[in-house]
Every structure is written in structure tokens, then in C-alpha cells.
Image: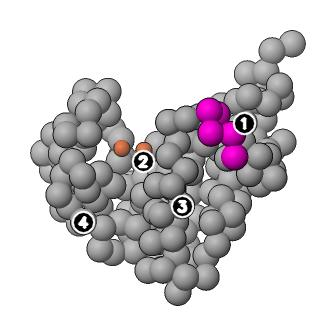
């Protein structure tokens, strides 16, 4: 969630500079109820009322609901919605690539290393490659006239995550001796 927040803040500076906090918040909160409702039917549909109770703007609740259209029926419509899914799909893989490096340091992760792992279908198999590519293509079409290429997106998310490496525990401090 912190990784998605960082990626969302990065894109907000380009796409919605007056709403960086909102975009970041959507990234930070989008999976807040996953441990409580760990199914695609429950998450985040059942979490949404909690967010509303806590005073989160409906606008942001809607974006969170749209990252699981299959479960919530809420379609992605706005740049914020497309950005969330595109960022969400990539952060897990980057985290996994950093954690299998002996250094456990995201500073050592290059796009090339992510590419290599991307092709190994058994690596981080929970990251659905086609869905990630589709989410990125949709985000690119809606927000970048189709000019945001998949690996450029990976690089952007990687850079955003590397900037908060310590917060993510990916700064090498968890490496074994
Ligand atoms: Fe989720
Ligand atoms: Fe997520």
C-alpha cells in the first residue's frame, strides 16, 4: 500500500498536481480491508462503508472500489481510477524482485532485472502478467494518449518506490549477513 501510494503520488504530480494528496491516499488505502475481507467479493466492497464512516470523500471511495470491478461493479472511468490499477499491478512484482536479491535493496533493481523475472512465469505467479499489461495499456490510453509504454511505467513505479526504500524495508537493511 505504501508502494502504491508512492507510485500514485508520482503520477499525480504529472496528471493532477493539485490532488497529489488525494491520489496518494487512494493508493495508501486501497487494500486496507484485505485482511478483514480477503475475497474478491468482499474486498473492497465491504470496506467501503468503513471508509465512508471515517469521512473519506466519495470520490476517493469510488476510485478504491474501481480497482476490483469484478467484485464491486464499479468501472474505471477517471484518470485516478486507471492510475490506481496500473500502479497496483506492478508494485508487487517489483517488491518480489527486490526481495530475492541477496542485498534486498531496491537500489540494485533495474528494469532489466524486472524484465527477466517477468518472463519467468513461476516467479511471483500471483502477479498476472496479462492483467498488468492491460491495466497499463488502459492507463496509457486514458492519461498519456497511449504514449506510456509498459516498461517505462515499470521504471516510473520502480523509481517512486526506490525513493522511499527505507519505509518499504527495501533499503538493504534486512539483508542477511
Ligand atoms: Fe486490492
Ligand atoms: Fe493492491
Q: CA distance from mark 4 to mark 1?
A: 32 Å
Q: What stretch of residues is rendered in magenta? A: 119-123
Give the answer, above or below, for where 13 lies relative to 22.
Answer: below
Q: Earlier in the sequence, mark 2 or mark 4?
A: 2
Q: CA distance from mark 1 to mark 2?
A: 20 Å
Is residue 91 visible to us here?
Answer: yes
Do callouts 3 and 2 mark residues in contact (Cβ within 8 Å)? no
Residue on which disc 4 sits: 75
Q: Earlier in the sequence, mark 4 or mark 3?
A: 4
Q: Earlier in the sequence, mark 4 or mark 1?
A: 4
Q: CA distance from mark 4 to mark 3?
A: 18 Å
Residue on which disc 3 sits: 133
Image quadrant of ligand 1 equals top left
Q: Residue at x 50, y 46 (%)?
A: 128
Q: Nearer the viewer, residue 12 or 138?
A: 138
Residue on which disc 1 sits: 98
The label on residue 90 is none
Tag nearer the camera, 1 or 3: 3
Amino acid at each position: 500500500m505504501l508502494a502504491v501510494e508512492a507510485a500514485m503520488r508520482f503520477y499525480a504530480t504529472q496528471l493532477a498536481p493539485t490532488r497529489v494528496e488525494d491520489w496518494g491516499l487512494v493508493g495508501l488505502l486501497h487494500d486496507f480491508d484485505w485482511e478483514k475481507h480477503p475475497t474478491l467479493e468482499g474486498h473492497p466492497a465491504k470496506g467501503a462503508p468503513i471508509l465512508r464512516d471515517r469521512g473519506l470523500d466519495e470520490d476517493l471511495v469510488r476510485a478504491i472500489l474501481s480497482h476490483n470491478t469484478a467484485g464491486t461493479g464499479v468501472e474505471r472511468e477517471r484518470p485516478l481510477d486507471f492510475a490506481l490499477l496500473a500502479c497496483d499491478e506492478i508494485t508487487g512484482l517489483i517488491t518480489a524482485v527486490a526481495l530475492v536479491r541477496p542485498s534486498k535493496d531496491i537500489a540494485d533493481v533495474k528494469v532489466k532485472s524486472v524484465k527477466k523475472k517477468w518472463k519467468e512465469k513461476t516467479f511471483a505467479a500471483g502477479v498476472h502478467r496479462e492483467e498488468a499489461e492491460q491495466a497499463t495499456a488502459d492507463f496509457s490510453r486514458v492519461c498519456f494518449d497511449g504514449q506510456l509504454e509498459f516498461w517505462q511505467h515499470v521504471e516510473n513505479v520502480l523509481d517512486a518506490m526506490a525513493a522511499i526504500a527505507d519505509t518499504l524495508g527495501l533499503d538493504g537493511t534486512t539483508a542477511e549477513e
